[in-house]
């Protein structure tokens, strides 16, 4: 009996065990199926990682519109950043879960805006190393929103809309930026540029310096390139010179005081008597220095003509033969200032002859013209990816009216006894340039001290947007001032204008690779009808000390002649 009971219990235990196994297997089967499903779904994702982004974009977006064709081209351009034609693994790792990727930006598993931003702090100008906005396999992009940094998926057309919808007028440099421009930009510089610009637009970090950082060109230069390559807006290319710079690390500009080639005048008579002509009138090292300046400007204090008659009643009138204009090339001259009180000495026809002579030599000019519109026009130079405007006006004459101001239909100069016209010129130039240099003929002849009238005008010009102000007319040097961060040299004096001995020099402006502008002074001496570069250190310091004494209290001139705020 006991044996039967024991056998029955054994059978019952076996049945119970088998049922448990069946139940356990039934529960495990769905888990195994789910796991297999995840692995199978991961296979296509792995294949996509090895597929060019343009092919992946085609599979997900095949409407055939022209904009989507551009998208493919732009994606191809970006994908070639590593030279392989494949997506950079750093850009596409774990694309099935970009949110998780952003969550892993710091060890806490939370989004870290600081870490995300730092990924692009060292991006080069080609836009190729950008990892902040992640390009997806379907041609879309993940951009973090401003409020919660949640990734948002964007196609290239979405990026265009975000830039155009959120970009400010200042960010666009007051240019009519549109989709066509952005397509051109993407094709030329890569899609990652568009991604960075879109992020800046939607997050409110719209710094104009971003354009130059991404492309090596400011928005103003990009607009000119776009106009030049597409043929659109041809007027934008008027009065523009594309200038090669001596260095890609900086842009240099220099400005002289008064120059006189007038026939029969002491300077020109001396020039004509010398065996080497103009080369005997300036030291060789000075001429070499001037030729190496990226943008060299002189004050043309006379007229080039064989016509006209001296203005009745005017004590000094200066006229040079038009062939003398070629002498300007000896200095490496790129542009001259005509906004002065001697360019009109022989009347309107002689002024027009002057403009024609300069045009024939290919030398730009500002401050005078056939009418007010032309007299008011700035001139632009594009250097190292930045656009620089030069504009000029004259305050002289203040009590007489020998030199006529241009009108709507008569030749003349642009005057600024009242600042309104010139401030309007500066404001307009500022809207479409990175820098505006204002050139002003003002002050009292023979006085080393600038007047309140000059200071008032300088304040108005600085407020209008001038980044630096260079003055002239007084036939002697005047001092420096800094007005709301804008450096001012009130007068460059004479450069080569008389037989008397006096200090002179070049006002120099340097714009470094980061875009910072600085003013300095290169001392020279005019003596015995020859101007030479000062190389003796004691003489340099003497001139710097003299300039310091006649400068504003808020200015300090360093031992190298650099103009700095007194507290620095």
Image (spheres, grey):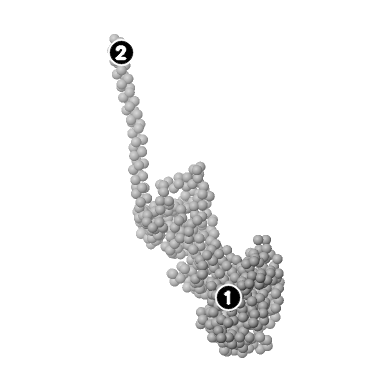
Query: In the image shown, does 557 or 62 lie closer to the viewer?
Result: 557
Q: Residues within 10 Å of mark 1 (few under 14, many from 20)?
A: some
Q: Kindly check if marks 2 and 1 are in contact, taking CB atoms under 8 A apart as contact.
A: no
The residue tagged 1 is 286
Using residue 518 as the reference point, say whether residue 102 is left or right of it: left
Front label number (2 vs 1): 1
Q: Which callout, 2 or 1, points at the residue further toward the start of the chain?
A: 2
Please identify the quarter of the rendering in which residue 548 is found.
bottom right
Using residue 73 as the reference point, say whether residue 286 is left or right of it: right
| Helix, strand or loop under label 1 | helix
The image shows residue 410 at horizontal and vertical percentages of: 58, 83
Residue at the image point whose x is 54% and y is 59% from the top? 207
Residue at the image point whose x is 54% and y is 68% from the top? 251
The image shows residue 58 at horizontal and vertical percentages of: 35, 55
| Helix, strand or loop under label 2 | helix
The image shows residue 422 at horizontal and vertical percentages of: 62, 73
- In the picture, the quarter occupied by the C terminus is bottom right
- Eyeballing the image, is 486 above or below 14? below
Residue at the image point whose x is 35% and y is 55% from the top? 55
- Eyeballing the image, is 22 above or below 12? below
Query: In the image shown, does 467 or 540 lie closer to the viewer?
Result: 540
Query: In the image shown, does 293 or 401 lie closer to the viewer?
Result: 293
Please identify the quarter of the rendering in which residue 77 is found.
bottom left
Residue at the image point whose x is 55% and y is 72% from the top? 293
The residue tagged 2 is 5
- Disc on res. 369: none
């Amino acid at each position: 009996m006991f044996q039967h009971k024991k056998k029955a219990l054994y059978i019952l235990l076996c049945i119970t065990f088998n049922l448990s196994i069946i139940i356990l297997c039934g529960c495990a089967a769905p888990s195994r199926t789910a796991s297999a499903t995840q692995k199978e779904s991961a296979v296509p994702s792995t294949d996509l990682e090895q597929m060019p982004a343009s092919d992946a974009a085609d599979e997900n977006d095949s409407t055939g519109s022209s904009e989507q064709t551009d998208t493919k081209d732009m994606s191809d351009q970006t994908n070639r950043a590593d030279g392989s034609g494949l997506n950079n693994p750093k850009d596409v790792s774990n694309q099935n879960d970009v949110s998780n990727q952003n969550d892993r930006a710091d060890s806490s598993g939370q989004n870290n805006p600081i870490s995300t931003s730092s990924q692009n702090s060292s991006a080069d100008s080609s836009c190729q190393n950008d990892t902040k906005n992640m390009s997806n396999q379907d041609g879309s992009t993940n951009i973090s929103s401003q409020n919660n940094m949640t990734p948002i998926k964007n196609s290239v057309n979405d990026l265009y809309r975000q830039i155009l919808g959120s970009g400010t007028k200042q960010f666009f440099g007051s240019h009519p930026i549109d989709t066509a421009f952005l397509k051109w930009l993407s094709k030329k510089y890569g899609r990652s540029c568009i991604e960075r610009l879109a992020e800046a637009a939607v997050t409110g970090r719209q710094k104009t310096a971003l354009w130059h950082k991404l492309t090596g060109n400011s928005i103003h230069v990009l607009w000119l390139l776009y106009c030049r390559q597409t043929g659109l807006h041809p007027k934008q290319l008027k009065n523009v010179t594309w200038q090669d710079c001596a260095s890609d690390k900086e842009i240099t500009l220099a400005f002289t005081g008064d120059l006189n080639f007038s026939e029969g005048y002491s300077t020109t008579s001396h020039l004509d008597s010398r065996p080497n002509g103009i080369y005997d009138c300036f030291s060789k090292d000075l001429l070499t220095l001037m030729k190496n300046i990226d943008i060299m400007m002189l004050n043309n204090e006379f007229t080039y003509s064989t016509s006209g008659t001296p203005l009745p009643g005017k004590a000094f009138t200066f006229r040079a033969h038009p062939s003398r204009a070629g002498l300007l090339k000896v200095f490496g001259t790129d542009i001259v200032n005509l906004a002065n009180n001697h360019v009109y000495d022989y009347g309107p026809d002689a002024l027009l002859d002057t403009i024609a002579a300069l045009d024939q030599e290919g030398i730009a000019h500002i401050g005078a013209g056939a009418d007010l519109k032309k007299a008011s026009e700035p001139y632009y130079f594009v250097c190292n990816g930045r656009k620089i405007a030069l504009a000029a006006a004259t305050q002289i004459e203040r009590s007489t009216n020998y030199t006529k101001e241009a009108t709507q239909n008569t030749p003349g100069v642009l005057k600024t006894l009242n600042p309104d016209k010139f401030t309007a010129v500066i404001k307009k130039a500022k809207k479409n340039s990175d820098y505006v240099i204002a050139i002003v003929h003002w002050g009292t002849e023979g006085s080393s001290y600038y007047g309140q009238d000059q200071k008032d005008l300088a304040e108005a010009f600085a407020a209008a947007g001038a980044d630096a102000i260079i003055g002239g007319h007084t036939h002697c040097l005047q001092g420096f001032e800094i007005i709301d961060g804008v450096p001012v040299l009130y007068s460059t004096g004479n450069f080569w204008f008389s037989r008397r001995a006096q200090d002179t020099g070049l006002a120099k402006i340097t714009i470094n690779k980061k875009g910072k502008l600085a003013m300095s002074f290169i001392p020279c001496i005019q003596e015995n009808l020859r101007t030479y570069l000062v190389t003796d250190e004691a003489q340099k310091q003497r001139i710097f000390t003299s300039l310091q004494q006649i400068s504003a209290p808020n200015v300090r001139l360093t031992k190298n002649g650099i103009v700095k705020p007194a507290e620095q």
